[in-house]
Amino acid sequence: MIREYKVEDKENIIKILQEGLVLDMSYINEDFSSENNTILVYEDEGIKGFALIEPRNKVTKFYNINIYVKPNCRKNGLGTKLYNEAVSYLDEVKPNTLSTKYVDKENVSEFYKKIGYKKWFSFYEMTYNGDPKEESKLKFVNYEDKYYEKYVQLCADGFYDLRAENDIQPYICSNPNEEDRKNTIKEKDDIYLCIDDNDEIVSTVKIKGGYVDDLIVSKSYEGKGIGQETTKFAINKCIKSGVDKITLDVVVWNVSATHIYKKFDFDIVQKINVCRQFTEK
């Protein structure tokens, strides 16, 4: 039967996922603890699979549905039943866009194709388990509110090409407003900025635990090795904080960033394919 998730299910679901995937527990904990997410469980003499329903943008009615079925329970309709139940759960919302993702090595692309999904983009999950690097030549400071407008513009410029080339809308990802400003200042201890003599942002990186995110170099400083120096800073900062494993995600399209991370001994753990469909409701 299909039922709603209970807290005591978490341990069993993690065991199921570990049968075929490399897990980042920070992702798992976030997915299972978020009040915005809904999890449906298929149980029949034990948990056989589950569906995770995640709102990506409630304004545009964009939702993510991830389905996972135990490898030895596949090809008998469980995935379809979980998916149909998840879609039914969203009936009242009438979503405009649905997305899903799966590990590239899993032979599930035909399943998603049959239910209307098309390949969107892919990204690598990468990890670093090595020693500290030589000290970065750059100096970084924590984010301050006085840099908000410049920081928002840097993010918009830095991600525009990636988002446009992969049709990730909106192409301009930053929308300056008071709520965003307040949320950004809440993350000030995780956001690091390199500032030049004119008080302009040279590069930035967000470090949360052992996860490296939003590493961006100003357009005016591209081609000067700033990305490499920022990567060295991020690695060393994580290690100094006591982290054993450093993780990051990079879109496959971003060849230059992938090259830098490989140069600094990050390993590709797995490739994730993201698919989507536009509904007609």
Image (tube, rainbow, N blue to C red):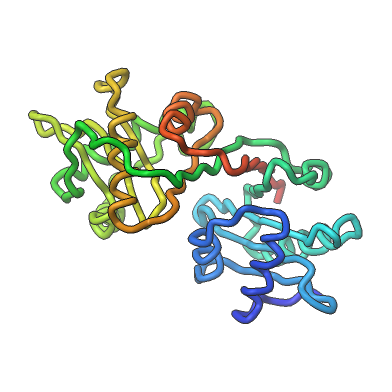
Q: What is the x, y in percent for residue 112?
A: 77, 46
Q: 152 or 126: nearer the eye?
A: 126
Q: Residue furthest right?
A: 76
Name the residue at 48% across, 61% down. Answer: 26
Residue 270, relative to residue 219: is it above or below?
Answer: below
Q: 182 or 68: nearer the eye?
A: 68
Horizontal side, residue 279 vs residue 78: left or right: left
Res. 45 image quadrant:
bottom right
Residue 91, relative to residue 169: is it above or below?
Answer: below
Q: 25 or 74: nearer the eye?
A: 25
Q: What is the x, y in percent for residue 120?
A: 64, 36
Name the residue at 49% across, 37% down. Answer: 250
Q: What is the x, y in percent for residue 135?
A: 23, 37
Q: Quadrant of the N terminus?
A: bottom right
Residue 46, relative to residue 28: is it above or below?
Answer: below
Name the residue at 57% across, 53% down. Answer: 61
Res. 24 image quadrant:
bottom right
Residue 61, relative to residue 260: is it above or below?
Answer: below
Horizontal side, residue 39 vs residue 199: left or right: right
Q: What is the x, y in percent for residue 148?
A: 21, 45
Q: 201 or 140: nearer the eye?
A: 140
For the image shown, how many numbered marks are present on the structure? 0
Horizontal side, residue 15 vs residue 85: left or right: left
Q: Residue furthest front?
A: 131
Name the residue at 19% across, 33% down. Answer: 138
Q: Residue furthest top?
A: 223
